[in-house]
Amino acid sequence: MALTRTNRLLAVGGSILVLVVMMLATVDPQTQYFVDEVMDNPDEFEGQVHLRGEIANGSIDSENYTFILMGIEHELFVDFSGTAVPDGFNEGKTIAVKGLLIYDSGAWTLEAKEIQTGCPSKYVSAE
């Protein structure tokens, strides 16, 4: 039995709709938190977390692959040995870090799995 043009369009449209619904159902958006939000009560956030903060000046240790991520009131030690460092990764820059928040040796540590930096703006005036 040959399908009419309308039936074929409905079949293709239905297939696309099913694929889009399946795609949206499998995407798990991860909320991004600031360092201070997490460190006010880190027990609630233990495990996978997506944090935003500023790299503390003088804190990047390239030999041990660590740095300190700062908020306004709190700071967090970050181990980035398990991830690549993107362009724009510098002290004083605001970044986003995805990783595993753990309590180790009496302190909270973030084991980074992904680091994201903002794109430098071409519209910032030179001083």
Image (cartoon, grey):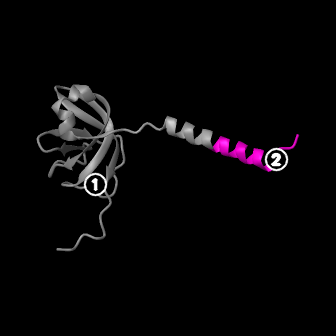
Q: Position of residue 3 (x, y in %)?
A: 83, 44
Q: Which of 105 and 93 is in front in this view?
A: 93
Instruction: Name, please, the residue furthest toward the left.
Output: 73
The secondary element bearing badge 1 is classed as loop
Q: Which residue: 33% across, 50% down?
A: 116
Q: Position of residue 94 (x, y in %)?
A: 23, 52
Q: Position of residue 36 (x, y in %)?
A: 17, 39
Q: Where is residue 46 in the image (x, y as percent from the top left)?
A: 27, 28
In front of the other: label 1 or label 2?
2
Q: Nearer the viewer, residue 19 or 115?
A: 19
Q: Mark 1 points at which residue?
A: 89
Q: Distance between the residues labelled 1 and 2?
A: 58 Å
For label 1, the crowd category at 10 Å Cα-Cα, with few meaning under 14, some 14 to 19 and many 20 or more, is some
Task: Name the side, left or right, on which 12 lies relative to 105.
Answer: right
Image height check: is 126 above or below 18? below
What amino acid is found at the position of numbered circle 2 in the picture? Thr
Displayed quadrant of residue 66: top left
Magenta region, residue range:
1-16
